[in-house]
Amino acid sequence: MIIGLDVGGTHTDAVLLSTKGIEKIVKVPTDPANLFNSVLAGFTKLLDTTDPGEIQRVVISTTLTTNALVQQEMGPIGMIVSAGPGIDPKFFSTGDHYYTVAGSINHRGREKAPVNEMEIEDIAQRLKKAGVEYVGVVSKFCVRNPSHEILIKRILNKHFKKIFLGHHVSGNLNFPRRIATTHLNAAVFDLHKAFFEAVKNSLAERGLTLPIQILKADGGTMSLESSMDFPAQTILSGPAASIMGAIPYAPADQDVIVLDIGGTTTDIAFLVNKAPLLEPLGIQRGQYKSLIRSLRTDSKGIGGDSTLRVIDGKLTIGPDRKGPAMAFGGSGPTPTDALVVLGLMDEGDSQKARAGIHEIAGQLNLSDMDAADHIFKKCCTIILKKTFEMIDELNSQPVYTVHDFLEGYKLSPQKILLLGGPAKFFADKIEEMYQIDTMAVPNASVANAVGAALARTTCEVSLIADTEQGIVTAHEEDFAEPISKTYSEDDLIETAYTLLKEKALNAGADSENMEEVEVVEFQKFNIVRNFSPRGKIYRTKIQLKPGLIKGFETILHQI
Amino acid sequence: MLKALNKTGLVFFPAFDWAIDPTHPEREERLLYTQDQVLEEGVFDIPGIVEYKPDLATAHDIRRTHFCVPDEKSVTTQSHLISAGGAMAIANAVMNKEVKSGFALVRPPGHHSMRVSHGGRGFCHINMEAIMVEYIRTQFGVKKIAIIDTDCHHGDGTNDIFWHDPDVLFISLHQDGRTMYPGTGFPGELGGPNAKGSNLNIPLPPGTSTEGYLYVIRNCVLPILAEFSPDIVVNSAGQDNHYTDPLTNMNFSAQGYAHLTAMLKPDIAVLEGGYAIEGALPYVNLGIILAMAGLDYSGVIEPDYNPEKLKQSVSITDKIKKTTDQINAYWQQRHQLREQAGKPGELIVRHREVFYDTDNIFERQKEKIWICRDCGGSFEIDSKATPGHHVLGVHIPINACKTCQEKGYDFFEKADKTKYERIYLQDRPKDRYEIK
């Protein structure tokens, strides 16, 4: 049996799954001040009738990192950044204790200016005096040559608890995002470590000793051990959990829209042939941009509890939430009240809901029923409009080859899957309004926990072979090997598969769920100098795709 | 916080799967390191910098500018259509005021392509800027346009296309034609009889450094631009004046290109040549993008940059000053020069030869144009290529007066079908193209 537990903003959801289906569902309120208690309460309730020895897998998703980032509850972190030519790295400052230093590597990974070791030693002393315990080190183009980061780490090692290096974060180029991501890893490390060690110990006391898996923003899992180097990857795993929970109900070979309609916001995501779309570089939320691999989601400030207003005779919905619906004791009308008035929702105080909607109806010069219907339709319109904008944006993404320009994949969804509390009420309306096959996912309110439970381990490796310089590298994996002039693209792909497999096993993947490997990128260039060929550059990126572990999906279909 | 002062649009189309041939300078790898630099700097994450997907130029778009012989399909590849479409996408973004200015980093380049195109010359098959300019004129009704070509090679293709057009000011700065392909672009090449002085060619001596280059911009290009007062300024942004370029002998730098961009303030820049793909392009392109966006570019310096070594000699400085004075004088005399070129109603004939180095084609042209004081004048070009085809192209300019429009049709109707394999009519006022 397997366990999935997702700590959400208001509820902590947990499920126990067997090959027969969902064995048990637990919902406990989340205590934002003590997430550990929420996790523990979930496990305690789930395990009180189950033998811990029967559990084969545990996956946890929390908002720990997200909360830390939002509330800026992070200790002082030292950042040492070397840039070379280009935009002034001062623009990418992470706050206090941010130092830009000498040293420069170019786009081919060649050293153009050395590190000044005395300068680093001096900064180390200053950081120590300031009480800094964790340091991030990032150099521009470190993914092409990490030697400066490694050298700086060697100087710092003896002074600090843990050093985080930029080239370990991602194989992608983007210096500002790499700085932000390295900083976040360093900043949440302490919190993450303390939290999960406490969880691990508490579960062990309850007889649950198997390795814990943690959900990442890309809808995949990693082992507790590997999460210690990249705790930032757990950020926004909640939305990812829900989207993964929709996959069992997505038809193969189709593009599917997933809408997770919550109280305040609606998350929008896409599946192509049962695999979620990923962000090209990493999570971004407003100004915050990172290299954290993530599902491509966007959210719109609209949900069951959004505030309703009439401004200049026109209805507006959200983006704020003042409290629950009037039907559930709130002070102002919300879309949920409209659902109650329309008779779609049986729960709640229908008289209070009607009073709230009546107020809006008066301002709109409509009957209560017409106003409720208008609110409901407008909710659907706002959500779908945003969804279609996202599809347009996805389909107009720039491409860099003639082939991709002419043959590029166009997303054209034929089905909508709905998640979240009010999902089942919206399905018929959306289908009626937009003529797209729409379905509320069964057990929609715990789809997040199911998604976490079933998510398989994911990872990605990026490799560059440069036959002119005679080297193949995957610096993210601390891998570099000499190659001959005759090294071919097949050799590169073979090396990539070996590295990916190793990385996946280290992250806790089991061998039967490692088949869904995909070459995400492959590029090949001739290096020519003075009109004669000097060698070739091959670049590739391969990934273990996000998806579900084998053996459970068909069971879920029967629920 | 990093934020673009000027909202800037970028089209980046490196055509990573297109080359003239595997070891040709115009090959897949050319913009690879530029892409690496731009991505590593996080340029596309800067608020106010917007990336656009290129459009696909159609045959109709090409036909506003070129007589492709025998047709568009034979002369172009998909990559050319995307490259031209990239320039058009930026033009749309600028003209629709989505961005203040924009840069199309596209390849293949186009500025050696002339109005008649039998194939490739100077790595170019069709002219991206010209196709974009004609698109802007038709789509948005813009009248006066200036094109400043800062590629190290004379922009002879663009020069040819706008040779008779008084509403397009074309200025090319390039290494002296006596030392460099295509061997043209001397100060006396001032445009056709109806457009004398609206084509200005500024040859620069080999070894011209940042100082000399910017002297010309400040003392010649900017004052002339101010007087012409165009609605749109286009920069053919070739990057081969760089001190490391393998095909040229100039001493320009990334800082110089960024300064140039900040001074010129082009509405639209389109990439042309530039073949120092590792040591120059990543820095030059980054400098241009930052300068366009109004961001600080002072840190964009090549790792091996040494201004002392690149200083120009006094004799070079003198030569540049003399050329500048000469060009300014021509500009001031442009109205008299047009008067002297011929009388209204007179038919002027010009013979020329064009060599297509990329595709090894030799072309002979005989061109006839009516002198007109009211517009650029309609003209016909009799073009015979070896190997290739013998064709006639008739052009009626977009701002043609009524008489010249009629004269254009006269050319077309009187053309002898037995003499030519094809006869083309480019009717710009009606945005029509006919073949007989």
Image: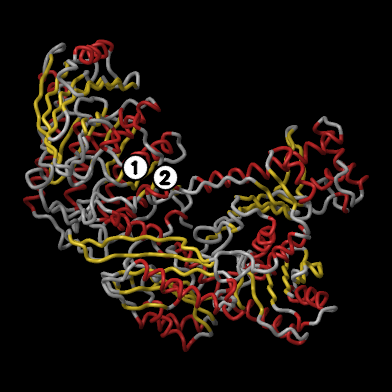
Up-down: is B33 above or below A511? above
Is A98 placed left or right of A234 in the picture? left
Q: Is residue B3 left or right of residue B332?
A: right
Q: What's the colour scheme? A: secondary structure
Q: Chain of mark 1?
A: B
Look at the numbered discs 2 and 1 and tell me whether their residues touch, using CB distance below 8 Å. yes
Residue A494 is left or right of residue B127, and the answer is: right
- Out of A372 and B264, give the one closest to the viewer: A372
- Residue B155 vertical placement versus B192 (above, below): below
The residue under label 1 is which amino acid type?
Answer: Gln
Residue at image x 80%, y 54%? A323
Q: Which of A253 and B12 lies nearest the eye of the viewer? A: A253
**Residue placed most toward the observer, A533 or B168:** A533
Q: Residue furthest bottom?
A: A158
Amino acid on which the number 2 mark rests in the picture: Leu
Residue A459 x/y as whole percent: 53, 70
Q: Residue at x 31, y 65 (%)?
A: A537
Report the Cα–Cα distance between label 2 and label 1.
Answer: 9 Å
SS assignment at label 1: helix
Q: Quadrant of the C terminus of chain B?
A: top left
Q: Which mark is on residue B78?
A: 1
- Residue that appears at 10% across and 37% down: B186
The residue identified by callout 2 is A406
